[in-house]
Amino acid sequence: MKPILFATGLVVVFSLSGCKLVKTESATEAAADPIATLVSKTFEAKLVPALSEKAIDVAVLRSAVTAGLDDAGSKYGLRVGGAGGGWNFAVKGKGKVVVENRDTKAAVAEVDVDGDGKSDVILQLGPVVKGTALRDVTPLYDFSTFRDQIEYARLGRALNDRAVSTVPADGSMKGKTVQFLGATVIRSAGEKPLVTPVSIETAP
């Protein structure tokens, strides 16, 4: 009997070793992405209106930051992560695109808002977007309500992806006047605002 049991055991082991167990995801599980659902429900309905309501003109912000970043932040912005973190600002502005670089995944347009022909603010066009200013610029997304830091980071990326999906993809903006609304984080007074826009409108 022992040889028979041993042989049977070999068959079982061999059979299992030749199989790969794959967990299948139901349609309900695939659709129920809490981050995607949250972005879908809040981006247009809550985040964009909040930005519109509190946005400061980027030219005014630059002057205020030059005078004192922390004072400007206390007045116009929101800081996440304590004293060591940057100030997040909702911003708006209008100016001429003087530089446009779409030859990279982190495409940008640089805008002159004061008419001197030089870049004053950088608009992120994506698809790669730096920072989490959209997530951190309002109290809408409280870290304590998320499972962990990984999920919170996913939210930041999802908001950025949703934002750049609205950016005009066809035709060059260079030389055109643009009007924009978005968010930026500033950590030093000499830093040029890097804006994640939720809307960009162009005119000839």
Image (cartoon, grey):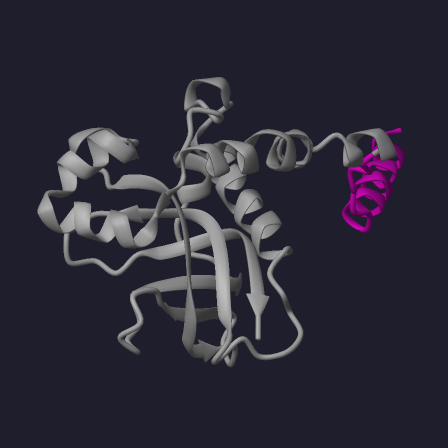
Q: Seen from this angle, which residue lies furthest left?
A: 67
Horizontal side of 153 relative to 78 (left or right) equals right
> Which residue is found at the position 63% from the left and 55% from the top?
166
Which quadrant is the N terminus positioned in? top right
> Which residue is found at the position 52% from the left and 71% from the top?
105
The chief SS type of the magenta part is helix
Which quadrant is the C terminus positioned in? bottom right
Is residue 24 on the magenta stretch? yes
Return the residue nearer the eye: 8 or 198: 198
Instruction: Give, as a single range, the part of the protein colored magenta.
Output: 1-25
> Which residue is found at the position 49% from the left and 31% from the top?
50
Q: Seen from this angle, which residue lies furthest top?
A: 145
Return the residue nearer the eye: 167 or 56: 56
Return the residue nearer the eye: 106 or 55: 55
x then y, percent, for residue 177: 49, 70
Return the residue nearer the eye: 68 or 103: 68
Dividing the picture into quadrants, the one containing residue 116 is bottom left
Horizontal side of 4 relative to 10 (left or right) equals right
